Image (cartoon, rainbow, N blue to C red):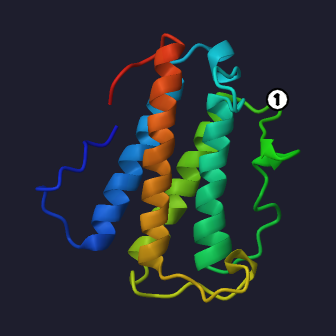
Amino acid sequence: MPPFPEPTAPADGRAEVFLRYLDYFRESVLVKVDGLAEQERRASRLPSGWTPLELLKHLRHVELRWIEWGFQGRAVADPWGDWRDGRWYVAPEESFAELTAALRAQGAHTRAVVEGADLAARGAPGPRWEGADPATLERVMFHLVQEYARHLGHLDIVAELAGGPVGE
């Protein structure tokens, strides 16, 4: 688990700050889900119905959509592969180990893209932007950090209700 990215810790620039927070939140989500029993990973304790495994898959696809499909403008076979019938979806045969590996691989890709680009660079035109001008990499990273932080807060509550890890 990476250390919490304290605001006073020296960094080489804004990109490194974004990456530290994203790495921290990503690994925190994985540690939280790892601390749950398998049945709790696949069950929902919420009226909305999402499960911790669905959250993992969702976060992987969020990075895929914003970095590869959006910023890089790559053709992505199934950018909405975390959705089925209007909600997040994980097939019964998808395992925690597979979803963890996919999320970490997506995170490594995100890191490589951010380290190789300028935060002021605009994304490639494409369907991700739904006709709007592509966002800068800095705006994409800000969005990813807030999405991870928000969902980690949701997962904190779910894990506590399930008798799993509590706190940061």
Residue at x 39%, y 50% (from the top left corner): 23
Residue 164 image offset from top left, x and y in percent = 47, 15
Q: Is residue 29 visible?
A: no
Where 79 sits versus 68, above or below?
above
Picture quadrant of residue 117: bottom left
Of all residues, the one furthest to the top in this rendering is 163
Q: Is residue 74 left or right of residue 60?
A: right
- The location of residue 48, given as percent across then percent down, is 70, 33
Residue that appears at 49% across and 10% down:
163
Residue 30, percent from left and from top? 49, 34
Q: Which residue is disc 1 drawn over? A: 93
Judge left or right: residue 106 versus residue 27: right
Q: Residue at x 73, y 79 (%)?
A: 130
Q: Classify 56 as above or below 134.
A: above
Relative height, residue 75 to residue 6 (above, below)? below
Q: Quadrant of the N terminus?
A: top left
Element type where label 1 sits in the image: loop
Q: How many discs mark residues in the rendered view?
A: 1
Instruction: Say whether residue 1 is left or right of residue 110.
Output: left
Q: Residue 50: image x %, image y %?
A: 69, 32
Depicted 103 relative to depicted 40: above or below: below
Q: Is residue 111 visible?
A: yes
Amino acid bearing label 1: Glu
Q: Image quadrant of residue 93?
A: top right
